[in-house]
Image (cartoon, rainbow, N blue to C red):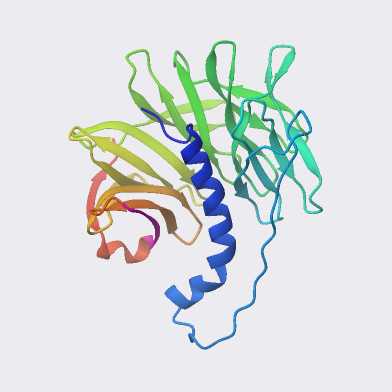
Amino acid sequence: MRKRKNPCCLCAAATLAIIILALHPLVGLAFEDTSATQAVSYSFISIDIPNSSGDLGFTSLADINNDGEITGGFTNSSGFGFLLGETFRSTDIQCSGGTNAVLNAQPQSISKRGEIVGFCFTGGRLHSFFRSKKGKYTLLDFPSALLTEAVGINDDGQVVGDYRDSAGRFHGFFWDAGLFLTIDVPFPEATLTSPNGINNVGQIVGFYDDNTGGRHGFLYDRGNFISFDLPGSRLTAPTDINDDGQIVGVYVADDDVPQSLFEKYQAASRLSIKRVIAT
């Protein structure tokens, strides 16, 4: 099983990008107790990027940094990834494969410095890539892994994601300047670990699956792994965390309807919490 690869997931990602633009001014109303009568103004921008054939494919926005740079990709097979600068000038993102560029790069995250990570298929397998601000590409392959997917990056260039081992099991990884470390939540019922985001404090969020098919959120913080589930949900999947400990993601309620998740780590007592020390 895998996430983020089917068209429905990519459509959802694009929809989330639009929803975030629409609802961002309302976050203060929901969580900062701002007066509901205060006037709110905002604007929408529709973004469609021509693909490598010059046609308009389905554009999927993956991430945006504090300088307004946006990265994303396309859901069709001809899609480059792309980087949009502050002036909305587009740069192709092409995961290098030997001497040839591969036209299926899927960027996932961009740092403040403009470094981009994601994954692409080349040479018969799925690789992660790291693109520097100057456009230099590095393939990130966890040693002996069947595939590697980079999903999140912080402003220090530290990367998290997942890989599949030779037995077919998925593990999380942390990468920093050429060094890989495995991330496996130490809960005995866990069968899969998938980190999705890392902040500049070094906190990591993601999800893990258990042996009954359940999916739970996790937070790694200074040697502690913390498991959490949104009350009343049967699936909790965090996607990112900021430097204030605020976590976003998705959850599925008992009525099978996917919902957005916003949680602040400091107020996590409202969640179902399980904490263990990393060894």
Direction front: furthest residue: 55
Q: Looking at the image, can residue 249 be seen?
A: yes
Above or below, 23 against 59 in this view is below
Instruction: Residue at 17%, 35% (x, y): give it.
Output: 212
Above or below, 205 against 28 in this view is above
Q: Position of residue 94 (x, y in %)?
A: 70, 27
Give yes or no for residue 259 being in the magenta stretch.
yes
Instruction: Residue at 33%, 22% (x, y): give it.
Output: 169
Quarter of the image where the C terminus is located:
top left
Q: Is 254 left or right of 29, judged from the image as shown?
A: left
Rendering quarter of residue 56: top right
Magenta range is 257-264
Give yes or no for residue 278 being in the magenta stretch.
no
Seen from the viewer's position, the closer of residues 230 and 132 is 230
Q: Position of residue 251 (x, y in %)?
A: 34, 52
Q: Position of residue 225 (x, y in %)?
A: 30, 45
Q: Position of residue 256 (x, y in %)?
A: 28, 50
Seen from the viewer's position, the closer of residues 218 and 225 is 218
Q: Looking at the image, can residue 221 be seen?
A: no
Above or below, 70 against 186 in this view is below
